[in-house]
Image: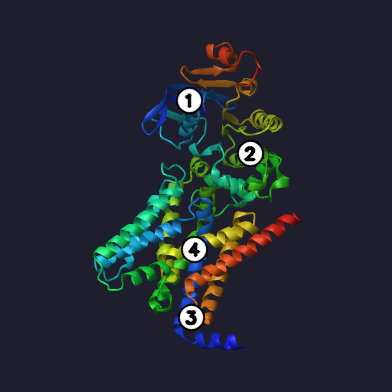
Amino acid sequence: MQILEKLALYWTYPFVRYALAVGVLIALCSSLLGVTLVLKRFSFIGDGLSHVAFGAMAIAGILQVKNEMPLVMAITILSAVLLLRTGQHTKIKGDAAVAMISVGALAVGYLLMNLFSSSSNLSGDVCSTLFGSTSILTLSAAEVWLCVGMSVLVVAIFVLFYNKIFAVTFDEDFAKAAGTNAGGYNLLIAIVVAVIIVLAMNLVGSLLISALVIFPALSAMRMFKSFRSVTICSAVLSVFCALMGILISILAGTPVGSTIVAVQIGAFGLSCLTGMVLGGIR
Amino acid sequence: MAQLTCQNLCVGYDGKSVLQDLNFEVYAGDYLCIVGENGSGKSTLMKTILGLQVPISGRILTGDGLRKNEIGYLPQQTLVQKDFPASVKEIVLSGCQGRCGSRPFYSKEEKRLAAESIRKMQIESLSGRCYRELSGGQQQRVLLARALCATRKILLLDEPVSGLDPKVTAQMYTLIESLNRQDGITVIMISHDIAAAVKYASHILHIGDTVFWGTKEAYLHSAQGRLFAPEKGGETL
């Protein structure tokens, strides 16, 4: 009862409601594309792109751009397109390309911040960008609506192009031979991924975005056998874990991002067990 | 008129040509086997025919009512597919993608077509199963069913029996033969197995240092044919 009372008290604060809404929406969006990304061997793209976004933020800071969002978005989308564009036929394979961009952007971003820093607390700035600051607790109503709009767009795109995304992910060459514009859909996936990652940086920070992309997909793949059920399960799991994570972090006073990931890890363990039990029955 | 005509075709990648000056025609109902050593450009040729790569020079013409996106393709398996969580039904249905155009969802007609392809490949009992749990031969049948959703006219098969054991290989060849004989579907197949090529194909395209294209009978009397297929149904190369 005490917990419920405490939650009811927190619920009266708008920032708690905002945080919950944004958290759930971002978890939903990132999990939808997570299945595709994991299968395309781009599990680390969340990490890579968030480092790019970090580098972009450093550049925005140096240029003293007032509203850094458009610049960060543009640079991240560009990197995502470069990474995913060539699909199966690259000289540098997916994991190596992602690692290269990820480490490179992080280093350059930190270097630039160091050289041209205007802030006295540099490591504090870096830390909050990477691990997610309290920014999810300081969201304005406008940011929440932006996030709602983006999420609706992402979900709509995903539902409308679900069959194409499946075809392109499963077999790019076949899809192309059948006349599907595989390049176009890869581009679309890349752009949507970049948008989600820039949005998600507000929630969990750069380093923990990967978890939002990977964990629900991997957990769902332990338990389910078809693409549709895996996708639905990963969306449900992701939303549930985000909700639990935020609630626990409010009650226990733990950092939001790491709490969500801890819940995800727990869910993954349970999924593995469930998968084993189901496999044993069959 | 031929379904597929290659005129002075030169294929390759990154601007380097692998195969020059190819001329051949494929008519409806033909069973063409493309044979040759590793690296001779068999797969490159097939990808060019499919439009996945642009030819360096020359032309590929389709005729006899065949449109470019009406070609059914059985690719070699990729790494991604090995642990892909997808049911057999979902994969076969994705073969109808070319028919959809920009329409987002599959129609009743396309679902019926997928069910029919599944029946034809005798994999109804597997239709709810997960692709990654199937054996190699079963997976090839699934991909063949998918290719059948994309076409009623011509199938391009890229080494359809690689990695299969002898018994399943024979079943696969019989299945392909029946599609060719009974359903009148043109087959173009890449193969390492010259003995099987000579046994099932109506035409042979042998690529390498010298190129041979013609009927199976002519191939058996040609220089390459005598070299590689000493006797009909002889040892696998």
Q: Is residue A152 above or below residue A9?
A: above
Chain letter, disc 4 residue = A
Sequence-wise, which precedes: disc 4 or disc 3? 3
In depth, the one of B177 and A197 nearer the eye is A197
Q: Residue at x 39, y 56 (%)?
A: A102
How many numbered markers are drawn? Answer: 4
- The image quadrant of residue A69 is bottom left
- Circles 4 and 3 in contact, beta carbons < 8 Å: no
Q: Which numbered dot is residue B140?
A: 2
Vertical relation: A164 (above or below) B187: below
B14 sits left or right of A236 in the view: left
Q: Circle 1 is placed at which residue position? A: B40
Q: Is there any visible trace of residue A155 in the rendered image?
A: no
Task: Tell me the quarter of the picture where residue A135 sits.
Answer: bottom left
Sequence order check: which comes first, mark 2 or mark 1? 1
Residue that label 4 marks: A30
SS at circle 1: loop
Where disc 2 sits, the SS reads helix
**Residue at 47% over, 81% down:** A16
For the residue carrying disc 3, how many other residues have a C-alpha within 10 Å: few (<14), some (14-19), or many (20+)?
some
Position of residue B148 relative to residue B230, above or below, is below
Residue drawn where x is 61% and y is 23% of the image:
B197
Q: Amino acid at mark 3?
A: Arg
Decide which of B201, B28 is in the foreground and name it.
B201
Determine which residue is flagged by label 3: A17
